[in-house]
Image (tube, grey):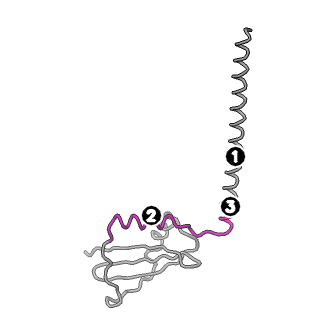
Amino acid sequence: MDEVKSKLTVFFEDPFYVGVIEREYGKKLEVTKVTFGKEPTDGELLEFLNNNYFKLKFIRVNQSDRKKDITEINPKRMKRMVGKEMKKKSISTKSQDLLKKQYEERKLEVKSKNREENKEKEERLFELRQMKKKKKHKGR
């Protein structure tokens, strides 16, 4: 029995997310393309594959069209490449950007308000300590 390898690659192809599924068994390679709307989550991808994998129409790739196998990439290099990709700003809608901006502004407001309240509290406690010291020295 031959071993079957499948690989799913999801990428952004303006304006939609696209998935390319490669299926390799023996020396044969078959490919299909699936278009998603918004960025699919891992759970959505798994559910899609479980429900629709056998309904997909794969196209056989000729050996002459097939590029030579890419040499194995060093794991450390792969980790660096993945890190760079993760740091890139994700593509989002204008409304999501606006909500994020509002959230950041609100966070700064709350932070400054808390800082002022803590400063006032510290000043009150300092004044109380000073009054206690004065009372102690007056001999009461």
Depth order, front residue of 109/47: 109
Three-letter amino acid code at the position of disc 1: Ser
Q: Are marks 1 and 2 in contact (CB under 8 Å)?
A: no
- The secondary element bearing badge 2 is classed as helix
Please rate how many residues cluster around mark 1, counting C-alpha atoms within 10 Å: few if below 14, some from 14 to 19, many from 20: few
At 39% from the left and 73% from the top, the residue drawn is 7
* Coordinates of residue 78 in the picture (x, y in percent): 37, 67
Q: Quadrant of the C terminus?
A: top right
Please state the horizontal and vertical placement of residue 27, each as a whole percent of the image: 28, 82
Residue at 54% in and 79% down: 13
Dot 1 or dot 2: first in sequence order is: 2
* C-alpha separation, residue under disc 1 versus residue under disc 2: 33 Å
Above or below 115: residue 79? below
Q: Badge 3 is on which residue?
A: 99
Q: CA distance from mark 3 to mark 2?
A: 26 Å
Mark-to-mark CA distance, 1 and 3: 20 Å
Q: Nearer the viewer, mark 1 or mark 2?
A: 1
Which residue carries the number 1 mark?
A: 112
**Amino acid at circle 3:** Leu
Name the amino acid, label 2. Answer: Gly
Taking depth in this image into account, of 107 and 8 the one nearest to the observer is 107
Looking at the rendering, the stretch of residues picked out in magenta corresponds to 73-100
The residue that disc 2 covers is 83
Pointer 1 with pointer 3, Cβ within 8 A? no
Query: Residue 102's x, y, as percent?
Result: 70, 58
